[in-house]
Structures are given as C-alpha cells and as structure tokens.
Image (cartoon, helix red, strand yellow):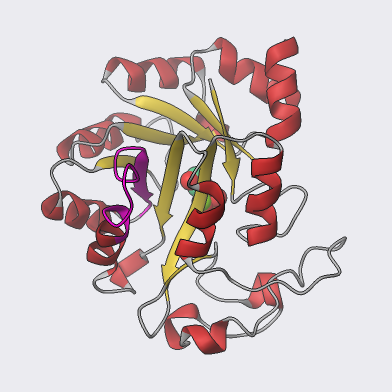
Amino acid sequence: MKIISHRGASGYAPENTLKAFRLAVEMGSKDFEFDVHQTKDGILVAHHDFDLLRTAGKEAAIADLDYSELKKFNVAAYFRPEKEALCVPRLEEVLDIVGPGSDWLNFEVKNHGNIYPGIERKVLAFLESQPGLFEKSVVSSFDYGTLKRFRELSPRLKLGFLGHGLSTMLLLPAIKRAKAIGAVNFHLALRIAFKLNVSRIKKAGFKVCVYTVNEKKDALKMSSIGVDGIFSNYPDIMGEWILKG
Ligand code: G3P
Ligand code: MG
C-alpha cells in the first residue's frame, strides 16, 4: 500500500508549502499529493483553498491575484508552531523538490465551476515539459467537467475520480461516471472506505486511494481491506505503523 504525502508532510509543516514537501522528501516519501490552482496571470500554484482566508488570514482569491501579488501572502499564518513566513509555491518549484526521486504524483486540480478556464491545457503542458513526469502522474479533481476536459485533451492521461459528498448509496453511479471518463484511480473519503465499498470499486477495475488517513487504526484497516494507497499528513509514522502492523 502506497503512503502518499498529503499536501506534503502537512502534519508537521504548513500544507502545500516547499517546507512541507522538503520535509516529506527527507522522511523518505516517494508518493505525493498536492492541490493545484491558477493565478490571474496564468501561473500554476500549489494551495488547497480557492482563497487565502484559512491559511493566511486574508480575504483574497487566487483567481484575482497575479503571482507577484500572491507570493506576498504568508500561508504559514494558520500553522501554530511555524514562525517562518512561507508563500504559495509555483508548481514547478514543488516539482523541483518532489519530482526527481518520486515514484507517483497526484495533481489534484481544484477547478470548481471552471473558475480557471484553460487550466487543463496548462497542466498537460506542464506534465509533458519534463521527461518521465507524465507517466508517473495521476490528475484528479472533484470537478467532473474538469476531468472530462482532461480526457478530451489527452486519451493517455491517468485520471483519478474524486466524488464530492459521496455516500455508499451514490457509489454505483459514481463508479459509472469514473468509468465513462476512463479513470484509472478512484480516490475515496475515509468516512465511506468500508470493505464492501472498496471491493466494489476494485472489482470495477480501479485502484483505490483513501484520504485522509492520520490514525494508526485507520491505516491498519485500510491495509487489511486491500486499499492501494492512503493519503496522509504524517507519512513517516504511517509507514512505520504499516510495517510493524
Ligand atoms: O486528493 C485527495 C484529497 O486531498 C482530496 O481532498 O480536500 O484534501 O483536497 P482535499
Ligand atoms: Mg487534495
């Protein structure tokens, strides 16, 4: 089972910052997830939310800022132990850190309602800009329209289906939707990662990765029910727990 650093080692350092990714690499991570947005001037960046309220304590949306303005915000402000000011990194800076030694990368593209028109082309061009990057990457999104556009642009791209507000009852229609776009991965919320749900998704031919797993009992359970990967904010201790059982 893969242990995927979720937003970097985000249990120890501010999420989606270069510090969190560096730390994950130091901890021996080979598999990474990060959230992708686009600035007003078309720069791809790593951040979870569409705005900076939670992380920087400021009311400003990424879509309304050029990168030169965005990088002035301290997105470590929310993270209590952190004293250093840290900015939203450009995607290429993240890749400089995690790219070389990584086995698997998950670009989670946040594009609800197509707030970033053209982001799919940009992400694809980015994936094709470095040797080997396209092959080891999976692009996921909660926005189905975004996944469809990715598929139209590239028949070979590995897609990961994410279902917003998914429940056990809505699982079969979700599997159909994931199949319709030729997804290879199905990323499932921990709250519905039951054995039966996981085996249904696996039987349909998908790899199943579960988010977000930060507790030992959950990690061991996911491993025992045949999950292919877990997204965790604590990639180091997760690995130890799985090894020791
Ligand atoms: O990509 C898995 C997981 O990160 C999806 O949820 O909200 O943490 O981006 P979220
Ligand atoms: Mg994410």
Q: Residue at x 61, y 85 (%)?
A: 59
Q: Nearer the viewer, residue 53 or 81?
A: 81
Residue 221, position in %: x, y?
62, 16
In this rendering, the answer to whether 241 lies above or below 215 is: above
Position of the C terminus by quadrant: top right
Q: Give the image quarter of residue 71.
A: bottom right
**Residue 132 within the segment the image draws in magenta:** yes
Q: Is residue 18 left or right of residue 67?
A: right
Quadrant of the image occupied by residue 85: bottom right
- Residue 233 visible from this viewpoint: no
Residue 128 image offset from top left, x and y in percent: 26, 53
Residue 187 or 163: which is nearer the viewer?
187
Whether residue 113 appears in this view of the structure is yes
Over which residues does the magenta segment extend?
Answer: 126-142
Residue 171 position in % (x across, y down)? 35, 31
Above or below, 49 relative to 184: below
Q: Tell me, yes or no, whether the highlighted magenta stretch contains residue 1.
A: no
Identify the residue at horizontal 49%, vertical 20% (top origin).
Answer: 227
Whether residue 131 sits left or right of residue 105 in the image: it is left
User: Residue shown at 74%/69% (left/top)?
Assistant: 76
| Nearer to the camera, 234 or 51 | 234
Q: Residue at x 34, y 33 (%)?
A: 185
Give above or below for 147 relative to 175: below
Q: Is residue 208 above or below residue 95?
A: above
